[in-house]
Image (cartoon, helix red, strand yellow):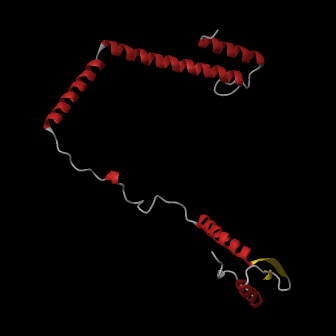
Amino acid sequence: MGCTSLPSFIQMSSATHSSFSEKLRNPQKKSQIVIPTTTRETHTTISWSFSSQCKALHKSVPLAASLAILLWSTPAHAGFMSGISGIEAIPGPQLPQIDFLKQLNEENQKKYAENDERIKSSPLMKELLEKSKLNKEKNRKEIENKYCIRGAEWGVGDCSTAGMSPDEREKFIAMLKQKAGEE
């Protein structure tokens, strides 16, 4: 790819412009480009070959465009159809009903309901449910006692021993452990 023209964002003085037109005729010759800086008196001189300028320009323009898109893009939204419900909201076509399968399904549902009711009312299931409730309460108490003892030892929580003397603290922790059945 040859570099035949410069982008419009590069502003050149007339001396610089003639230097560039000379470079177009003879690209291998090195030249000096005078670029004005912020003050009027000082100028910066850059010496490089025209072909390296074209290469640098061809590499920097896509990079600058990419950075501009990345930095100035708007935040992502749900999409251009964000207010429209998806295809899953549209009901599908009504499938043909097969009487044999429909009747078989109703019979199976009736059997399942009868079996569930029979199992729930059995004496064994009632006994197991009662044991489960009792175990749940017992386990809750054990966990509560364990955390109370730990809080007393560490001096935090509801069972904190922060304001007690060392003797009172030891007696309180021993009483909690006895109550919990650890000693």
* Residue 153, x across and y down, in percent: 70, 21
The residue at the far left in this view is 99
Q: 152 and 21: which one is in front? A: 21
The residue at the far right in this view is 41
Q: Is the N terminus in the top left, top right, bottom left or bottom right quadrant?
A: bottom right
Q: Is residue 181 left or right of residue 15?
A: left
- On screen, 42 above or below 52? below
Q: Residue at x 45, y 16 (%)?
A: 134
The residue at the far bottom in this view is 14
Q: Is residue 89 left or right of residue 27?
A: left
* Residue 15, x across and y down, in percent: 77, 89
* Residue 131, x across and y down, in percent: 42, 14
Q: Residue at x 17, y 35 (%)?
A: 102
- On screen, 120 above or below 54? above
* Residue 169, x across and y down, in percent: 73, 18
Q: Is residue 163 left or right of residue 144?
A: right
